[in-house]
Amino acid sequence: MKCFYCKGDISDGLTNHVVNYEECIIIIKNVPCEQCIQCGESFYNDEIATKIEDILTEVKVIVSGVAVFEYGKIA
């Protein structure tokens, strides 16, 4: 697979997913992804993207300020 943006090579990796939600910042650390080795852009497969959405749906109810979560512990 090649990067959609720069056509660089893609490899498996981990990234931090950051979301600005109303007055809050939500960070999910060490999310599995495919990452471009040239430009650093990250891509999620359907399963990971769905899990991220599920996590954010739950977290948005309880969070205020800044919240940091470890993906492996909450997925």
Image (cartoon, rainbow, N blue to C red):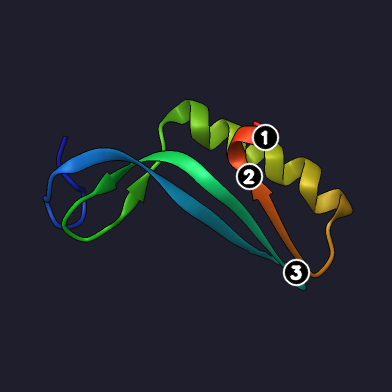
Q: Residues within 10 Å of mark 1 (few under 14, many from 20)?
A: few
Q: Residue furthest bottom?
A: 23
Type of amino acid under label 3: Glu
Rounded to the nearest whole Å, what is the CA distance between mark 2 and mark 3? 21 Å
Tell me which label, 1 or 3, sits earlier in the chain: 3
Residue ID at (30%, 55%): 41
Q: Residues within 10 Å of mark 2 (few under 14, many from 20)?
A: few
Type of amino acid under label 2: Glu
Residue 24 vs 14, above or below: the answer is: below
Q: Residues within 10 Å of mark 3 (few under 14, many from 20)?
A: few
Rounded to the nearest whole Å, what is the CA distance between mark 1 and mark 2? 6 Å
Eye-nearest disc, 2 or 3: 2
Give the quadrant of residue 14: top left
* Direction from residue 54 to residue 46 in the image, left or right: left
Rounded to the nearest whole Å, what is the CA distance between mark 1 and mark 3? 25 Å
User: Quick one: SS at disc 1?
Assistant: helix
Type of amino acid under label 1: Lys
Rendering coords of residue 4 (x, y %): 21, 49
* Direction from residue 75 to residue 39 in the image, left or right: left
Residue ID at (50%, 54%): 16
Rendering coords of residue 6 (x, y %): 14, 57
Residue ID at (86%, 50%): 61
The image quadrant where one finds the C terminus is top right
Q: Which mark is residue 73?
A: 1
Q: Which mark is residue 70?
A: 2
Q: Is there a contact, CB below 8 Å, between mark 1 and mark 2?
A: yes
The image quadrant where one finds the N terminus is top left
* Direction from residue 66 to residue 50 in the image, left or right: left
Residue ID at (50%, 42%): 31
* Residue labelled with disc 3: 22
Eye-nearest disc, 1 or 3: 1
